[in-house]
Image: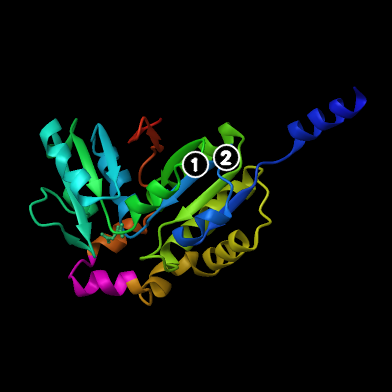
Amino acid sequence: MIFSLIIAKDDMTKKPSLFTCLTPEIVHLYDFSSKISVVTDILRASSTIVTALAYGASEIMPFANESDCKIKRNENFIIAGERNGVTIPEFEMGNSPFEYMSDKITGKKIALTTTNGTQAIEKSKGADEILIGALLNLKSTAQYLVTQNKDVIVVCAGWKGHFCLEDTLFAGALAEELIHLGFDIDEDSTLAALELWKNSKENLNKLMEKSSHFKRLNKLNIHEDAKHCLTKDLYKIVAGIRKNTIIVLN
Ligand code: MLT
């Protein structure tokens, strides 16, 4: 009896922890059960999703696979997506946040497939809940996580299995917020992400200009997207998955 009371007290006092899965290639190393996953793909899928929801899209259904996404056209979805940063031929929209800053998406359902972001969502499906995190909705996401009192795993979408600076910066930014809100941070990858964020947050562009996807987008003449995607707390929304589709939770 005394023993179970001690365990119950321990459960109540245990702070939630934040983990960082630095690329989807190592998701199998994490136990997602009873945890919340925050999927991030700063350049650009998660930033675009958050922007589209902020501009009134009613839902965004993520697909790992191009053909599954395309079929949704028959169900009144706008079909959207990219491969290697370029809009998929025959799709109505690509993956630039600026395409979604328009009345044309208000109240609309969007089916989205992307090179890495929607694949990372697929790989996070063992979690109790999946959120979509961006710098654009950083604080709102952190505040929501605190109300849930569960361990959190940030899943960085990376690039084709490789580590990406921008997603790791997001993990560090979220760690900084969550430390102030009472989370425990003691996993090495989260500590590394936090250090990277602290060292770069005053001049994100300086580091980002060296990053591979930033250079890739520049080659495609997409300069403005990165600037938008690196903006903190522009939108006060929490994006989360309910019944396989992404909606505004609050
Ligand atoms: C992805 O999912 O890999 C992307 O967001 C790539 C991009 O469109 O920039």
- Left/right placement of residue 28 relative to residue 243 reads right
Q: Position of residue 157 (x, y in %)?
A: 40, 58
Q: Position of residue 123 (x, y in %)?
A: 42, 49
Q: Residue 193 versus residue 116: which sits nearer the camera? A: 116
In which quadrant of the rendered image does the N terminus lie? Answer: top right
Q: Earlier in the sequence, mark 1 or mark 2?
A: 2
Name the residue: 54% across, 49% down.
153
Gap between marks 1 and 2 measured at Cα: 6 Å
In which quadrant of the rendered image does the C terminus lie? Answer: top left
Residue extending furthest toward the right: 2
Residue marked by disc 2: 33
Q: Is residue 164 visible?
A: yes
- Left/right placement of residue 107 relative to residue 162 reads left
Per the image, label 1 sits on a secondary structure element best described as: loop
Crowding near the residue tagged with mark 1, few <14, some 14–19, many ≥20 C-alpha atoms within 10 Å:
some
- Left/right placement of residue 83 relative to residue 249 reads left
CB atoms at circles 1 and 2 under 8 Å apart?
A: yes
Q: Is residue 102 visible?
A: no
The amino acid pointed to by label 1 is Gly
Name the residue: 18% across, 33% down.
108
Q: Position of residue 182 (x, y in %)?
A: 66, 43
Per the image, label 2 sits on a secondary structure element best described as: loop
Q: Main secondary structure of the magenta part?
A: helix
Residue marked by disc 1: 126
Q: Residue 114 versus residue 211: which sits nearer the camera? A: 114
The amino acid pointed to by label 2 is Ser
Q: Position of residue 231 (x, y in %)?
A: 36, 55
* For residue 60, above or below residue 24: above
